[in-house]
Image: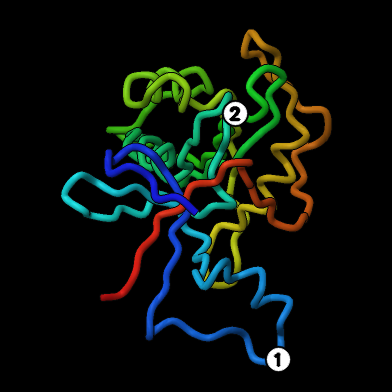
Amino acid sequence: MQSVPRDGKTMGEIVLRGSSIMMGYLKDEKTTSKAFDGGWFATGDVGVIHPDGYLEIKDRSKDVIISGGENISSVEVEAALYRHPRVLEASVVAMPHPKWGESPCAFVTLKKKSEKNHGNVKEEDIIQFCRKNLPHFMVPKKVQFMEDLPKTSTGKIQKFQLRALAKTFVISERGNSSNNNSTQVNREQPRYYHQTQEQSLALSRL
């Protein structure tokens, strides 16, 4: 296990160890062995460490998009989308890309038209807005407008449904996208991403 450099850029999984961390799951050795690696508890969160030692959580490991070797935080892309004056809700997941393996796909609901927010918003408008506010490799290659995003009874966006829908999109290397199937959302199990040389943020309780 290797700690990431304190550069505020390199992302790694946050792991914990200390007297306040649980010993394991009751009567569930299989789950416990998955959660712990060499005595470190894997939180499932990824983040960066800044030069001053400040730890910033960036995303959940299952929501990180790996595009051409670059780790893209879906939370950062969503934050940029929410700055658009017409965006009401946004959720970003990975979609297949023929060259980069994965690329960001944004699902967006729009605010109702008003005197301040008038005119139709197109996919290209959202993409151009993101180009002005994000590094180009983080810009969504596909923007899908929806009436409502799928949510749980408590209002949490169900990203696993959006991942299933994003899998049906096909994008060319030129950036043109299409949908092989209908926009009906199908259920799937959450997908987790693992790198061959996974780096972790080694944190201990003093």
Give the residue at mark 1: 27
Q: CA distance from mark 1 to mark 2?
A: 40 Å
Closer to viewer: mark 1 or mark 2: 1
**Sequence-wise, which precedes: disc 1 or disc 2?**
1
Answer with the quarter of the image where residue 195 lies: top right
Q: Is residue 120 visible?
A: no
Q: Amino acid at mark 1?
A: Lys
- Residue found farthest to the top: 174
Q: Nearer the viewer, residue 177 or 203?
A: 203
Q: Nearer the viewer, residue 72 or 167?
A: 72
Mark 2 neighbour class, 10 Å CA radius: few under 14, some 14 to 19, many 20 or more: many
The tag on residue 103 is 2
Residue drawn 56% across the image and 32% down it = 104
Horizontal side of 10 relative to 8 (left or right) equals right
Question: Is the residue 151 above or below the residue 21 in the image?
Answer: above
Q: Amino acid at mark 2?
A: Ser
| Percent of width and height locating residue 203 | 35, 64
Q: Is residue 160 visible?
A: yes
- Residue found farthest to the left: 52
Tag 1, which secondary structure?
loop
| Percent of width and height locating residue 201 | 40, 55
| Percent of width and height locating residue 137 | 47, 22
